[in-house]
Image: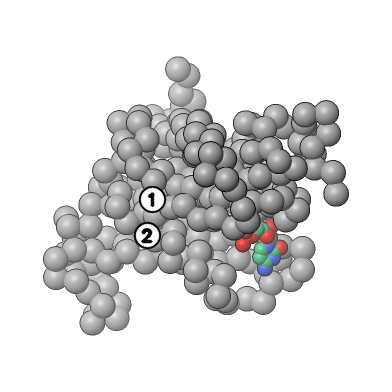
């Protein structure tokens, strides 16, 4: 399958272009914080509950809040019906995503409590873990959970020898490598990497370039996350 035609990707994007992103904070009444996010063909909803009492009680930590993250795919979110319920893939994604968010949450402020993050994938189109993390970050802020910054996530793929930002399904599937990143952004600056996974093969130099490409993409997503939060609380579009 030809993925790059005349220096453009199948959906017309340049190599360093993100898919269209839409973010809306505060869409659920019963959650403490929530977010709906689209990233190309990914459509996800994040809901945050807490800080609240821990159930079951024996899981509570006297020194800090525990963080739980559940990534879950709707059975209709993918081409071939997905069996409902957790599977190996969603358990792994939930674990790495929780670890990507933990460093940013000020857990020590809430001993003996839990902060529960649920993310539902309604439609998947590669990079769903990155879309979910972006939504979860906004939902955490919407819930008023004290944070040291914000987590922003995007993947880079290698396709026909080129590094491309934010791969869609065909690029992920037929490409040579897929590298999702998440970054902790504090005071408008990328401070650290909180998630880095890779399948496929890259040279060391390509990995360095992939990181730079991902960082540029993450800064754009970060601005949209910020705008979504400001829009919710200031109540209008934010124009810089
Ligand atoms: O979504 P993400 O890239 O974070 O994770 P992945 O395991 O690399 O999956 C890539 C894509 O494969 C997903 O976004 C879905 O579009 C698709 N997929 C699927 O069609 N059926 C599944 N059971 C799992 C994933």
Q: How many marks?
A: 2
Mark 1 and mark 2 lie on one chain; the one further toward the N terminus is: 2
Horizontal and vertical percent position of residue 130 = 53, 50
Q: Residue 151, labelled with which disc? A: none
Residue at the spot of label 1:
194
Residue 60 seen: yes
Say if 183 sits above or below 118 in the image: above
In-front residue for pair 37/211: 211
| Residue farthest along the left direction in this orientation | 63
- Residue 156, image quadrant: top right
Horizontal and vertical percent position of residue 55 = 30, 77
Q: Is 149 left or right of 71, judged from the image as shown? A: left
Say if 166 sits above or below 120 in the image: above
Residue at the spot of label 2:
99
Q: Identify the secondary structure beneath mark 1.
A: strand
Q: Which quadrant: the C terminus?
A: top left
Q: Identify the secondary structure beneath mark 2.
A: helix
Asked if the residues shown at circle 1 and circle 2 are in contact, with their CB atoms under 8 angstroms apart, the answer is yes
Residue occupying the point 32% across, 64% down: 67
Residue occupying the point 22% across, 57% down: 107
Which image quarter has ligand 1? bottom right
Residue occupying the point 16% across, 55% down: 109
Whole-Å distance between the Cαs marked 1 and 2? 7 Å
Horizontal and vertical percent position of residue 222 = 45, 35
Q: Is 189 left or right of 172, judged from the image as shown? A: left
Residue 35 seen: no
Residue occupying the point 54% across, 69% down: 90
* Ligand 1 contact, mark 1 (Cβ < 8 Å): no
């Amino acid at each position: 399958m030809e993925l790059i035609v005349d220096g453009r990707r199948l959906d017309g994007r340049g190599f360093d272009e993100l898919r269209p992103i839409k973010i809306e904070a505060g869409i659920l009444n019963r959650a403490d914080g929530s977010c709906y996010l689209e990233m190309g063909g990914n459509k996800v909803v994040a809901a945050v509950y807490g800080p609240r009492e821990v159930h079951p009680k024996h899981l509570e930590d006297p020194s800090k809040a525990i963080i739980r993250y559940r990534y879950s795919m709707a059975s209709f979110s993918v081409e071939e019906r997905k069996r409902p319920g957790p599977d190996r893939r969603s358990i792994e994604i939930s674990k790495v995503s929780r670890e990507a968010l933990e460093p940013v949450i000020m857990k020590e402020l809430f001993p003996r409590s839990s902060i529960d993050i649920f993310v539902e994938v309604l439609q998947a189109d590669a990079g769903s873990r990155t879309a979910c993390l972006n939504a979860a970050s906004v939902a955490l802020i919407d819930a008023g959970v004290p944070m040291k910054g914000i987590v922003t996530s995007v993947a880079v793929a290698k396709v026909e020898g080129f590094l491309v930002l934010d791969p869609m399904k065909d690029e992920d599937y037929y490409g040579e490598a897929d590298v999702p990143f998440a970054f902790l952004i504090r005071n408008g600056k990328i401070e650290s990497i909180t998630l880095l996974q890779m399948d496929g093969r890259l040279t060391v130099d390509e990995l360095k370039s992939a990181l730079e490409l991902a960082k540029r993409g993450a800064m754009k997503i970060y601005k949209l996350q910020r705008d979504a939060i400001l829009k919710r609380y200031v109540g209008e579009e934010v124009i810089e």
